[in-house]
Image (cartoon, grey):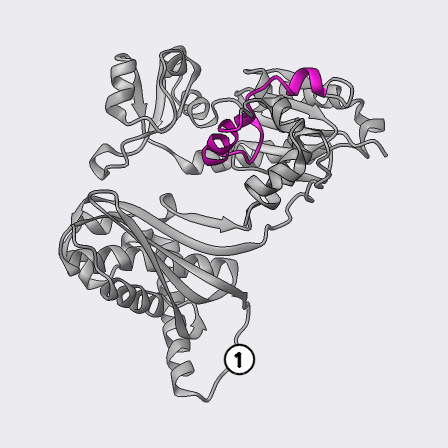
Amino acid sequence: MKRVILHSDMNNFYASVECLYDPSLRGRPVAVAGDPEARHSIVLAKNYEAKACGVATGNPLWLAKQKCPEIIFVPPHYDRYLKFSRLAQEIYSEYTDQVEPFGLDECWLDVSATTEIFGSGTKVADSIRKRIKFELGITASVGVSYNKIFAKLGSDMQKPDATTVITPDSFQAKVWPLPVGDLLYVGRATEKKLAKYFINTIGDLANTSPEFLHRLLGKNGIVLWQFANGLDTSPVSKYGSRPLIKSIGNSTTAPRDLVSENDIKITLYALCESVSARLREQNFICRTVQITVRDKYLISYERQGKLDYPNRTAASIFELALALYRQNPPNAPVRSLGVRACDLAHQEYEQLSFLPEVQEIQKKEQLDRAVDSVRTRFGHFSIQRGIMLTDTQLSRLDPKNDHTIHPESFFR
């Protein structure tokens, strides 16, 4: 069966949703940005009007303002983005059960088996664009191809609200002239390595010896060569399937430099409670805890250690995280901290134990679940540890809006 793969990318997703909720923002340069007081002062997303002025994702707010004096900064509302992401996926699922999210605003669809019902890939793409525009009030660009890599390239080639088709007969003319950095999984470091050997376009990559690329980039060099030559055969996952999660973590940039151990404890507690709660949500326990520390001079390091007994209690994760920090404290005040639970194992139910150490862990687990229940009913800050009240500025981290869950990625 001939494969028909679509990649749908909702245009300027965060900014488009914000403009939908506040019509006065339409037609004006808008950027979704972090809280400057919390030092999350970068552009998270921007609309086309801001982009036309040179504003880019990741710009500090002062630079964005310098480029575009009329720019309007709005805070992110992740609950809205999740809602619209789910609504879009419901639309996609009406055309196929093979729907694979790639972030909140992007999805691959395999419609190979349903073209006899809904028409060609191009017709399905156009139908999806029209429905997203009419039902959700935002626009999307859709790439149509015979593999996932070229479908994503297609969705990036024409914006906004466009369908781009890349076929086996046309990919060399359409894809090969593009910068090599446009190819999925070619990051900045890889792009710089390739540029040293005058590999600047996807066509250059496709026509380079795979043996040379293997020597230069390892096994990833072979994979990228296959991608450039249209040889990607990776499948699109089923709708609702869960990715293999390798770690669950949370990190934050503090609203001020952390100078005392009490500052560190408050921040670590907030992070560890968040990680612990998400482990319970996903029915995981962890064997390893990893911390990331970055000082005011942006010098960072990571440390990790093993728990005595695999578990997911906030107290156990915190105690090990603090011990790891104490083993090698930085010489300068700390700017940001991160905590990650690794070596995960699935545990939905647990057996009673006669070991005193395990019984103690199970008591802490019951306490954590009680705290979860209170926070679910009355809000995250309805119940806090006493130490958190000693500095309300540091303890205001909302873990629901500042977290990272790390699925198994392509190059891991």
The number of numbered badges drawn on the structure is: 1
Q: Residue at x 32, y 26 (%)?
A: 59
Q: Residue at x 58, y 45 (%)?
A: 218
Question: 184 left or right of 29?
Answer: right
Whether 187 is among the magenta residues is yes
Residue 131 seen from this side: no
Position above or below: 395 against 101: below
Would you identify the image quadrant in which residue 384 lies?
bottom left
Quarter of the figure that contains the N terminus: top right
Whether 249 is among the magenta residues is no
Toward the viewer: 11 or 19? 11
Question: 210 left or right of 48?
Answer: right
- Segment tinted magenta in the rendering: 171-197
Q: Position of residue 84 (x, y in %)?
A: 52, 32
Q: Residue at x 38, y 83 (%)?
A: 357
Position above or below: 311 against 330: below
Q: Position of residue 316 (x, y in %)?
A: 35, 70
Q: Secondary structure at mark 1?
A: loop
Would you identify the image quadrant in which residue 173 lies?
top right
Q: Position of residue 249 (x, y in %)?
A: 41, 53
Residue type at numbered disc 1: Gln
Q: Position of residue 13 (x, y in %)?
A: 48, 26
Outermost residue to the bottom: 354
Disc 1 packing (10 Å; few <14; some 14–19; many ≥20): few
Toward the viewer: 317 or 78? 317
Toward the viewer: 118 or 65? 65
Label 1 belongs to which residue? 351
Position above or below: 258 against 3: below
Residue 96 seen from this side: yes
